[in-house]
Amino acid sequence: MVADPARAAEPVLSSRIACEYWKRRKINEACDRDDLLRVTKLINGGLNGLEDRRTLAAKAKAALARIEGIPLSGAVAANDDRPVLRRGSKGEGVARLQSLLRDLGFAVAIDGDFGPGTEVAVLRFHSERQLVADGIVSPETWSALEKASGKKAAA
């Protein structure tokens, strides 16, 4: 790292650095209590960035509520060919997603496993299309993918 500090910006390495910092600063306890002020102080020693952190935390909570609401509600997607997908999802729907992403020039494996590479591609796709960059493949994401690729997501 000393010889090549730019490596810290690599996604996998930057995640490891952030997780190690989080662990060493013992931030999890304050986070589990949903104590945003304490988390902010543990991260930077003061309250710098509090408003941004508050905004991003609200977005994250809303995304988690949407994710959890799907299985809790018992709702079934209107179109099983376009399932809601996220990291950890597996199967044919993920393979179709990966195929569409590959057609759009994203370097992803088509293996039916929504892992970190697929998540990064989805996040980048979201950002490029001004969608909510949450890494979740929702009906809105499927529609944008289909429009961008000129293909239907169905098998």
Image: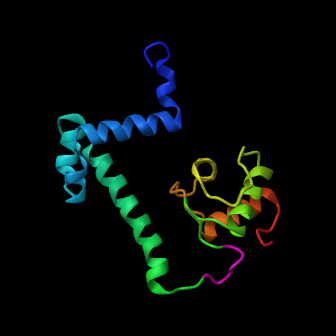
Residue at the (33%, 56%) spot, across then down = 57
State which region is magenta. 77-82
Task: Indicate whether 18 appears above or below 112.
Answer: above
Residue 15, above or below 109: above
> Where is residue 27 drawn, in percent x and y?
23, 46
Q: Quadrant of the N terminus?
A: top left
For residue 82, which quarter of the picture? bottom right
Tell whether position 80 is magenta.
yes
Q: Decide whether residue 71 is among the magenta residues.
A: no
Along the horizontal axis of the image, is 19 left or right of 141? Answer: left
Q: Main secondary structure of the magenta part?
A: loop
Which quadrant of the view contains residue 110?
A: bottom right
Task: State the quadrant of the C terminus.
Answer: bottom right
Residue 122 lies, in percent from the top left, at 61, 53
Q: Is residue 69 above or below residue 88?
A: below
Q: Position of residue 28 (x, y in %)?
A: 25, 50
